[in-house]
Amino acid sequence: MNKPIYLALDFPTWEQTNDFLQKNNLEGIPVKVGMELFYREGPDVIKKLQAQNHSIFLDLKLHDIPTTIYKSMRNLAELGVDFVNVHGLGGADMIKAAKQGLVDGTPHGKSQPKLLVVTILTSMNQDTLTNQLGIPHPLAEMVTHFSKMGKDQGADGVVCSAHEAAKIKSVCGDDFLTVTPGIRLADTNSNDQQRVATPKLAKQIGADYLVIGRSITEAENPKQIYEQALKECNNVNK
Ligand code: C5P
């Protein structure tokens, strides 16, 4: 795995996304498409990125009743992306339905998108959990709980903070994937992310894939920062 970083394409339009990728010579790198871009451009944006050889994490964080999730995942499975995801807060039946949708919707001969469970968003902390959501349990326990529940229902991995990756691997096994946003290069602003780590630390403590957005997209030289982060990751022997 020599390209373990998915660049978060948090841009409002395809035009801005494409300008950014072309201007910075980032064609063909793995990318993450989230709600902002997908809700504007629809599935076409996936096809356009694939035509430029990007592999894709489609980060729509689905959360609904199991039937709706099953049907939605059956549709998304046709897009040929690497990863899709659901919120762990949707519960075991919803995760199971998501997986079944992927199984049933993936065209013959195509690889099935991997299903990730969002544990607790990396913008949240214990205070958010306890005082806003009314969940009294320690955040770390909830992360492990959602991971285990996801694994039991057939998910392939989780989206979590790098700081939780090692614990998740110890509970769910080394093959259970950990994809970690909340990554900051050593000298950049953490913005609204609470549980941050550098690329090197994230890989050292058990992240399989990293998601990086603003540290790269808002950098003066995005390509240089991307290469630097990639080098940091690839120098870590797991
Ligand atoms: O700009 P930054 O590196 O903070 O971007 C993080 C990206 O990862 C955003 O696109 C955000 O939606 C996503 N993400 C996250 N926390 C999660 C799951 C996804 O920040 N738990």
Image: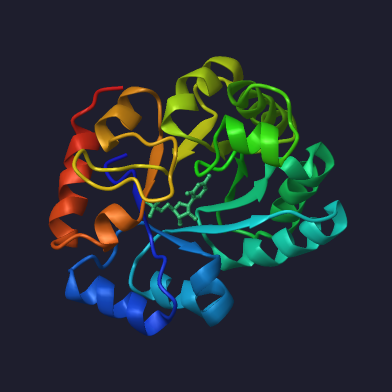
At x 29%, y 46%, the residue is: 3
Return the residue nearer the eye: 210 or 135.
Answer: 135
Q: Residue 136, relative to residue 93: is it above or below?
A: above
Q: Residue 78, relative to residue 154: is it above or below?
A: below
At x 13%, y 61%, the residue is: 221
Question: Based on the displayed image, in which of its 4 quarters is residue 154 positioned?
Answer: top right
At x 28%, y 37%, the residue is: 199
Point out residue 150 in the picture as x, y percentages from the top left corner: 69, 34
Q: Do we see residue 42 in this rendering? A: no
Return the residue nearer the eye: 39 or 1.
Answer: 39
Q: Is residue 106 left or right of residue 7?
A: right
Point out residue 122 in the picture as x, y percentages from the top left corner: 50, 41
At x 30%, y 59%, the residue is: 29
Point out residue 136 in the picture as x, y percentages from the top left corner: 73, 25
Q: Do we see residue 75 in this rendering? A: yes
Give the residue furthest to the front: 131
Point out residue 191 in the picture as x, y percentages from the top left corner: 37, 50
Give the residue furthest to the bottom: 15
Question: Based on the displayed image, in which of its 4 quarters is residue 208 positioned?
Answer: top left
Quadrant occupied by the N terminus: top left
Circle count: 0
